Amino acid sequence: PKKLKKKNEYSVQVSPGNTVQVSPHLTLRIALSVHAKAYDPLGFVLPCKMIGSLLLRLSIQVLRKEAQGPVPWDQVVDGDLLRRWSDYFSMLVTLKDVKFPRSFKPANCDPDVEPDLVMFSDGNPDSFGTCAYAVWTLMDGSRQAVLLMSRAKLSTVLQKGEAVRNELSGAVFSCRLKEWILRNSGVKFKQHYAFVDSKIVQAMIQKTSYGYSTFAGLRVGEIQLKSDPRA
């Protein structure tokens, strides 16, 4: 991320100007290069970048049908794919206007009250992910949530379309991210709250992991080991 000089803030910038230059034609190689320029290790703009990740996989699948063999990195992208990449590049350019504070601790927080760690996770047929917030108590008694980081992954091609598997994987991601934050943030949290909106996953983690398939059993067991499903 680019640190702003005048304010103690961050933004993600992919181009010095207000445009992304693609010349003479857009190829997969160029598309991936532009996509990778949005360097965002904490996942602040992950909702935008996931659009590019999904679009890249779709583009590879479409172009490989047209040209059998290895990934056609230098094949020209045109038609509807070109339009969708153009829309995505436009979003990347506007990311520079989205500002994030460098410090995740509000200046007017109550020093005597420890923050809470709140996690959200979810999955859909194409991907799964999680995000973490620190919820601080301010001096006036109000609460303020600050985004700490987020993580997401595309589902595997063979398992694409299975939402429940991805929702379960998102819950595992949430547990792993919580462990990483507690170990590396240097902040002592008062309580940990994990939100999963999938009723199926909520029911799965209440039972022992032995009766599930290998895929589900390992993930349910990890969730139960790293969190309290009944909390």
Image (cartoon, rainbow, N blue to C red):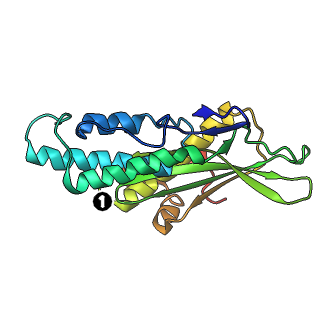
Name the residue located 16 percent from the left edge and 46 percent from the top edge.
Answer: 63
Instruction: Name the residue nearer the viewer: 83 or 221.
Output: 83
Is the C terminus in the top left, top right, bottom left or bottom right quadrant? Answer: bottom right
Name the residue located 76 percent from the left edge and 37 percent from the top edge.
Answer: 187
Is the N terminus in the top left, top right, bottom left or bottom right quadrant? Answer: top right
Count every numbered label the image shows and give the total: 1
Up the image or down, 224 lies above or below 31; here it is: below
The amino acid type of the residue labelled 1 equals Gly
Q: Position of residue 110 (x, y in %)?
A: 89, 48
Instruction: Name the residue nearer the viewer: 224 or 192.
Output: 192
**Residue 94 horizontal side relative to residue 163, left or right:** right
Pointer 1 residue? 161
Label 1: few (<14), some or many (≥20) within 10 Å?
some
Instruction: Name the residue nearer the viewer: 106 or 173.
Output: 106
Residue 74 visible in the displayed image: yes
Up the image or down, 125 lies above or below 114; here it is: below
